Image (cartoon, grey):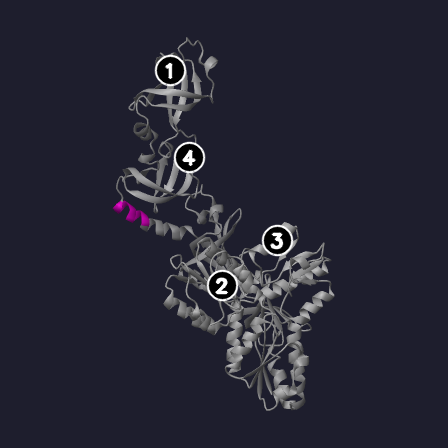
């Protein structure tokens, strides 16, 4: 009898995360209670209880002094509120894929849309999803229940559709096809977990190749039972929680048996079942058959060898892969990518095939440590060397700077670009290049010494841009440019291979002391051409807009005779200047401050005072404004008389 084992069998990412968290808390001496059985596996739950972990049916069952663990199924919003009200310490192990559905459910509530959930309404995951929306909800288990639905009460607001992460894939496809035809305004989110998709697909593939499918998992586990249903379409399928439930009569007359496991099944139980089945097989195998099996599983594995690995499980810090030998392969996150912010689950999925290079082998423990990054670097080095010979332009990401220049990662290879070859101007800040995609050519490639130039590519591109610019430019034309550098008298803006000067007086209608008060290096701004000097290739730019001119606003909004309150911004011997609008000040002459004689302006007013003034006159050509406080006093006296 031949045994085929599913590569995706066992803990999924969310369950693995929850179990590890709970065991860690117990080992650290925390008193913890899980809301409901942590996973649908009685053996694992019993082991946790032996370590002091309490399984609580609800918050009212959590013992005093215990901390609460929310399992991977997640809970409704009201449970979080109740935990906060009770002041309990919370450890949230909700699967990130489930948490994403919670956010979608909340969005449906916020937007007044009807939420459709494909799943089992009695399952804790579905109950948690429903608990994150306050609007209309309909849960359906299959296409028949969906067809029987009368539709949303308010169809104009729209529909949002999600699925339980372990929902049967074939049923989901049937239901979504129906929804697309009958509800054209529905937003459909494929929220079935990638591990579930892969696990069910593999179960279906294996069921076609075997006479019996053994599914290992809790009898109350939703995803385990769905695997049984998937397999039953093509072969006989049975489910067991442990090896003790295996029955010899199942294997009578069976040539090939396939084994898979639900997402809540520990690897120890899977191995126990496989070992129990293998013992029976070994008793029937000849020496030649055992030798052939041994040879197949003893492929030489050594440091530097390139292998293909299939991703079997993912944790936050590493990925486990099957490399076709007795060795268990591990790829650390740092050997998958150079991005420190990257997450393993975003880079690879269970079932992905990866080309890897072996870094280290431990035959005693049956472990091989692998790297994708180093293999890519090895391949990349060949491409870089070829590009150096042919002068090909390559693309890379600037990862860091140093005293001499910048480091660009090209095809996994670190290329040094000297400071003089990194930017077109000496005053440009090379730190601004970090994390930027750049084009460069390889100028030297000798062993580990690999040197490149960004300038040479930039210079050629800019030459073409300049030619196109001068052929098309005209006064008044608007461009979107990038601020390249600042001086005391203005900002230089790149408007497409050509740098134009935006004088400080053209940056703002207000008086500014330095361009940095308005723009910064790297800013993308919209400018227009004020003047051109084609012979010397100089361009003068404007940034401030005519519609923002405060004098125009004054003309439109403040007619002669207007009365308003404004702050005093400066004091002189002959009067006080009052701020009418940003950039526009008017003068209250000393003779217009009061009906009584004012000897010294500072005796009556000080900077910061809010005063009531009347607009007497405006000279727009000379930018002079006359204001009066006394006129308002005269008006008050006239009204009193």
Q: Secondary structure at mark 2?
A: helix
Mark-to-mark CA distance, 2 and 4:
45 Å
For marks 1 and 2 on the same chain, the one whose residue lies earlier in the sequence:
2
Q: Quadrant of residue 590?
A: top left
Q: Secondary structure at mark 4?
A: helix
Q: Which residue is mark 3?
A: 82
Q: Which residue is mark 2?
A: 381
Q: Secondary structure at mark 1?
A: helix
Mark-to-mark CA distance, 3 and 4:
53 Å
Q: Which residue is mark 4?
A: 515
Mark-to-mark CA distance, 2 and 3:
57 Å
Q: Are marks 1 and 2 in contact (CB under 8 Å)?
A: no
The residue drawn where x is 38% and y is 14% is: 633
Q: Which residue is mark 1?
A: 636
444, 539: nearer the viewer? 539
Q: Is residue 424 magenta?
A: no
For marks 2 and 3 on the same chain, the one whose residue lies earlier in the sequence:
3
The residue drawn where x is 42% and y is 43% is: 523
The x and y percentages for residue 50 are 74, 66
327, 107: nearer the viewer? 107
Foreground disc of the pair 2, 3: 3
> Within 10 Å of the Cα at label 3, are there few (<14), some (14-19), or many (20+) other Cα atoms?
few
């Amino acid at each position: 009898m031949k045994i085929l084992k599913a590569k995706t069998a066992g803990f999924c990412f969310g369950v693995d995360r929850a179990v590890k968290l709970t065991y860690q808390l117990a080992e650290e001496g925390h008193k913890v209670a899980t809301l409901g059985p942590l996973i649908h596996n009685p053996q694992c739950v019993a082991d946790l209880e032996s370590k002091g972990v309490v399984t609580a049916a609800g918050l009212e069952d959590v013992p005093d002094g215990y901390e609460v663990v929310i399992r991977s199924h997640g809970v409704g919003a009201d449970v979080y509120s109740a935990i906060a009200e009770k002041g309990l310490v919370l450890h949230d192990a909700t699967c990130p894929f489930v948490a994403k559905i919670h956010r979608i459910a909340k969005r449906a509530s916020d937007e007044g849309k009807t939420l459709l959930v494909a799943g089992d309404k009695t399952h804790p995951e579905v109950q948690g999803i429903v608990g994150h929306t306050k609007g209309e909800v309909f849960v359906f288990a299959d296409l028949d229940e969906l067809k029987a639905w009368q539709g949303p009460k308010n169809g104009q607001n729209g529909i949002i559709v999600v699925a339980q992460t372990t929902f049967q894939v074939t049923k989901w496809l049937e239901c979504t096809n129906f929804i697309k035809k009958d509800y054209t305004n529905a937003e459909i989110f494929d929220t079935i977990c990638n591990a579930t998709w892969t696990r069910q697909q593999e179960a279906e593939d294996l069921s076609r190749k075997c006479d019996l499918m053994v599914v290992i998992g809790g009898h109350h586990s939703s995803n385990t039972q769905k695997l049984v249903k998937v397999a039953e379409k093509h072969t006989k399928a049975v489910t067991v929680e442990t090896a003790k439930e295996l029955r010899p009569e199942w294997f009578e007359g069976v040539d090939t048996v396939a084994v898979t496991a639900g997402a809540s099944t520990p690897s120890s139980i899977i191995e126990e079942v496989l070992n129990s089945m293998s013992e029976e097989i070994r008793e029937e195998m000849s020496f030649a058959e055992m030798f052939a099996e041994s040879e197949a599983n003893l492929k030489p594995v050594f440091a530097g060898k390139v292998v293909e690995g299939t991703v079997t499980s993912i944790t936050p810090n590493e990925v486990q892969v099957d490399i076709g030998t007795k060795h268990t392969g591990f790829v650390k996150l740092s050997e998958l990518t150079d991005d420190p912010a990257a997450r393993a689950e975003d880079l690879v999925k269970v079932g992905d095939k990866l080309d890897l290079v072996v870094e280290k082998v431990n035959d005693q423990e049956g472990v091989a440590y692998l790297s994708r990054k180093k293999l890519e670097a090895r391949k990349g080095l060949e491409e870089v060397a070829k590009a150096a010979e042919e002068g090909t332009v390559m693309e890379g990401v600037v990862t860091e700077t140093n005293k001499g220049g910048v480091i660009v990662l090209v095809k996994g290879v670190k290329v040094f670009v000297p400071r003089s070859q990194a930017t077109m101007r000496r005053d440009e800040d090379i730190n601004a290049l970090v994390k930027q995609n750049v084009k460069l050519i390889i100028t030297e490639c000798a062993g580990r010494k690999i040197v490149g130039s960004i300038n040479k590519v930039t210079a050629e591109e800019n030459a073409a841009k300049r030619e196109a610019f001068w052929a098309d430019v005209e006064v008044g034309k608007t461009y979107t440019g990038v601020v390249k550098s600042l001086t005391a008298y203005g900002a230089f803006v790149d408007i497409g291979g050509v740098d134009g000067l935006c004088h400080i007086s053209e940056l703002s209608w207000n008086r500014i002391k330095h361009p940095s008060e308005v723009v910064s290096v790297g800013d993308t701004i919209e400018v227009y051409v004020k003047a051109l000097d084609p012979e010397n290739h100089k361009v003068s730019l404007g940034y401030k807009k005519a519609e923002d001119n405060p004098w125009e606003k004054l003309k439109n909004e403040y007619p002669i005779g207007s009365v308003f309150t404004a702050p005093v911004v400066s004091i002189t011997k002959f009067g006080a200047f009052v701020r009418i609008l940003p950039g526009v000040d008017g003068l209250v002459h000393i003779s217009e401050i009061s009906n009584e004689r004012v000897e010294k302006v500072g005796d009556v007013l000080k900077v910061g005072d809010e005063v009531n003034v009347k607009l007497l006159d405006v000279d727009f050509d000379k930018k002079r404004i006359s204001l009066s406080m006394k006129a308002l006093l005269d008006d008050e006296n006239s009204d009193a008389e």
